[in-house]
Amino acid sequence: MPAADPRPTPPGTADERRAALGSMRADTLARIERAVLTLFSTRDFHEVTLLDVAKEARVSLQTIYKYFGSKEVLVYAMLDVMLGRLAERMIDHLQGIDDARERLRKTFWVTLDYMDKHPAVMMLLFTAVPVSRHQNIGIYESPELMGAFMGVFKDGQARGVLNRRVSAKILLDIFMGIIGRVVLMHIVRREKQSLLEQFDELFHILWRALSADEG
């Protein structure tokens, strides 16, 4: 008979992983997060091993297996944690804003500000996770974050200020496509000027892409 696998079985679903991570010591989780960012944003995905992560985070390999089980799940779970902070900021900043254009402007500012300040998170998202696997990052299914985004676009369409000839999902795709490409190339080119320093002009471009035709 083959020997039993000594590694613990990690939690399966995104919700189960969130619950499990909630029981982890905060300093341990922070070390793992820093290790993932350091290793996966500077090296190719296939070059990094779970043992590398354990050593960098100063935790046992068994701990990594217990909570994650695989390299892919580890990256998905850490991105879920990191992007969850964007969700919290987004929801907080949209409170009390009624004007549709200002809601879109604030949504764009919060997203750009987060990406501008966390380039390693963006490199991790764009280089370590294939687009076909983005749905495995729990926050992409978050009703809070997606509700905040979709609420902005649906509200703008309902008020007639955003393009209504396509769905709100398409508007979200255009929004994320523009900002994702701009941020990624900003990082790749190692630009010194902050993207927020160009915010007004960038929002003008975005607004022209999403707004309803005049007249």
Image (tube, helix red, strand yellow):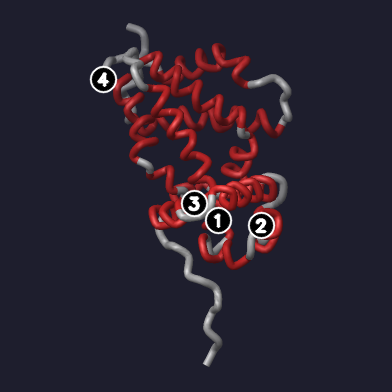
Three-letter code for the amino acid on which mark 4 is drawn? Ala
Which element carries disc 1, helix, strand or loop? helix
Specify which label sits upstream in the sequence, 2 or 3.
2
Q: Residue at x 55, y 57 (%)?
A: 72
**Dot 2 amino acid type:** Val
Q: CA distance from mark 1 to mark 4?
A: 40 Å
Q: 144 or 22, which lies in front?
A: 22
Q: Report the side of 44 relative to 150 (left or right).
A: right
Bin the neighbour count of mark 1 within 10 Å (Cα to Cα): few under 14, some 14-19, many 20 and up.
Answer: many
Task: Identify the residue position indicated by label 3 in the image.
Answer: 133
Give the structural element (helix, strand or loop) at label 3: helix
Is 201 displayed left or right of 40 in the figure? left
Q: CA distance from mark 1 to mark 3?
A: 13 Å
Circle 4 Cα neighbour tier, 10 Å, few/some/many (<14 / 14–19 / ≥20) = few
Whether the residues at callouts 1 and 2 have beta carbons within 8 Å, the answer is yes
Closest to the observer: 215 or 4?
Answer: 4
Q: Amino acid at mark 1?
A: Leu
Mark 1 vs 4, N-terminal side: 1
Lower sequence index among marks 4 and 3? 3
Q: CA distance from mark 2 to mark 3?
A: 21 Å
Image position of 213 with respect to 43: above or below: above
Question: In the rendering, at what x and y percent does residue 155 appear?
Answer: 29, 22
* In this rendering, the label closer to the viewer, 1 or 3: 1
Residue that carries the numbered disc 1 in the rendered image: 74
